[in-house]
Image (spheres, rainbow, N blue to C red):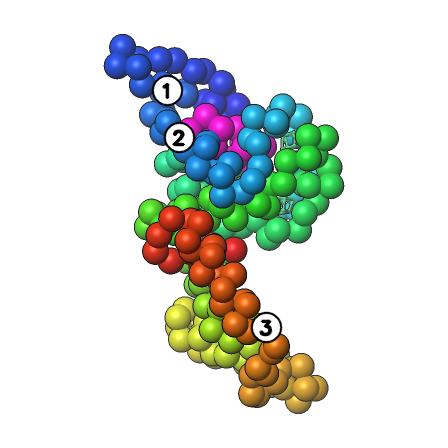
Amino acid sequence: MGDAISAESATTSGEVRFGGKKTEPGFCREVERLSGQKLSACYQCGECTAGCPVAFAMDLMPNQVTRMALAGMADEVLQSRSIWLCVGCNTCVTRCPRLVDLPRVMDSLRQIATHRGVRCPEPAIRAFHDTFLHGVERGGRLHELALVAALKLKTGRLFQDVPAGVAMMAKGKLAILPETPEGKAEVRRIFEECKRRAGKGDGHAG
Ligand code: SF4
Ligand code: SF4
């Protein structure tokens, strides 16, 4: 992959290619605007990837995501499994000598992928992601039981983990009824503002 993203060339039409792949002008700016991160600050030391606990399952390493987003390789980045597999643990942030907040970058990439209707290669993660955010937007905080129920309906995995769920209910870890938190209206306003900043449509991304 390192080679694929290192060979930059310009065609006669002025189109810039990386490793023979077409790049999207303005993609880096879009990611930087949404994430508040400066991608060009990354000098590819690889510390983020070395510490990432889920790098073993990713198709693009965290440092490659940064580099490819900087290069405008929108299709490759937005179609990758990595942007959905990132668990936002912040390990990379604590290791980064350039203070690049990769979880924010990953959030922004999920947001852009969602807006563009890019097919998610991890449908179960996408279902969790959407269900979680819709629940928080609607109720002001997460109601775990409603999340589990909605997720089961979405994924069709109706009976998976039922014994664990029953045990958690018995111990009072899963509330049957949702609470109405103070600040519910503010939470909704935060979602609306995120959608406005994202430009249009469903701003759910993380
Ligand atoms: S640790 Fe920071 S500077 Fe190093 S590759 Fe990762 S994002 Fe770039
Ligand atoms: S925040 Fe994401 S990219 Fe960073 S170490 Fe954790 S899982 Fe890996």
Mark 2 to mark 3 CA distance (whole Å)? 36 Å
The disc, 3 or 1, on the residue closer to the chain's N-terminal end is 1
Tag 2 and tag 1, C-beta contact below 8 Å:
no
**Disc 2: CA contacts within 10 A as few (<14), some (14-19) or many (>=20):** few
**Which quadrant holds residue 18?**
top left
Counting labels gives: 3
Mark 2 to mark 1 CA distance (whole Å)? 14 Å
The residue singled out by tag 3 in the image is 183
Q: Who is closer to the viewer here, 89 or 137?
A: 137
Say what amino acid the circle numbered 2 marks.
Gly
User: Looking at the picture, does residue 201 appear above or below residue 155?
Assistant: above
Say what amino acid the circle numbered 1 marks.
Arg
Q: Does the magenta segment cover residue 121? A: no
Q: x, y percentage for residue 81?
A: 47, 46
**Disc 3: CA contacts within 10 A as few (<14), some (14-19) or many (>=20):** few
Q: x, y percentage for residue 195?
A: 42, 55
The residue singled out by tag 2 in the image is 26
Per the rendering, the mark at residue 17 is: 1
**Which quadrant holds residue 21?**
top left
Per the rendering, the mark at residue 121 is: none
Q: Quadrant of ligand 2?
A: top right
The disc, 2 or 1, on the residue closer to the chain's N-terminal end is 1
**Disc 1: CA contacts within 10 A as few (<14), some (14-19) or many (>=20):** some
Q: x, y percentage for residue 31?
A: 47, 38
Range of residues picked out in magenta: 61-72
Say what amino acid the circle numbered 3 marks.
Gly
Q: Does the magenta segment cover residue 70? A: yes
